Image (cartoon, rainbow, N blue to C red):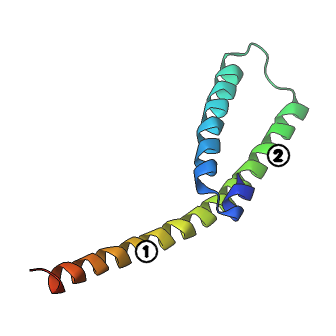
Amino acid sequence: MLALAQAGEWDELVDHELARRKIVGELRLALESGPNPLSDTERAQSETQIREILALDAETRTLAEGWMRELDTRLQSVNTSRRLQNTYLAP
């Protein structure tokens, strides 16, 4: 997902995020309902992977926030243009 954010592929990123949420939910359910607790090694590996995922998520979020600010600026510009047109071009 970070690569998609870096490439500006926002629609595809949203699709991946929806799929990711489903996978995470299924994984959480499986872990919570599983009869066997994780071994110390498995727990350490899981914690490392979770930290890596969170770091990637933070980078992706930073890129998405920049994109959202850019969109906001563009929308404000469009709204300003419309108001000017309505003011000066109105009959």
**Residue name at image x 47 percent, y 69 percent:** 71
Asked if residue 80 is positioned above or below residue 50 in the image, the reply reads below
Residue type highlighted by circle 1? Arg
Secondary structure under badge 2? helix
Q: Position of residue 78 (x, y in %)?
A: 35, 75
- Checking the image for residue 10, the label placed there is none
Per the model, the C-alpha gap separating discs 2 and 1 is: 39 Å
Asked if residue 68 is positioned above or below residue 52 in the image, the reply reads below
Quarter of the rendering containing residue 34: top right
**Residue name at image x 87 percent, y 32 percent:** 42
Q: Is residue 55 left or right of residue 64?
A: right
**Residue name at image x 78 percent, y 21 percent:** 37
Residue type highlighted by circle 2? Thr
Q: Which quadrant of the rendered structure holds the C terminus?
A: bottom left
Q: Position of residue 19 (x, y in %)?
A: 63, 36
**Residue name at image x 50 percent, y 73 percent:** 70
Q: Position of residue 6 (x, y in %)?
A: 70, 64
Residue under pointer 1: 74
Q: Position of residue 64 (x, y in %)?
A: 58, 62
- Checking the image for residue 48, the label placed there is 2
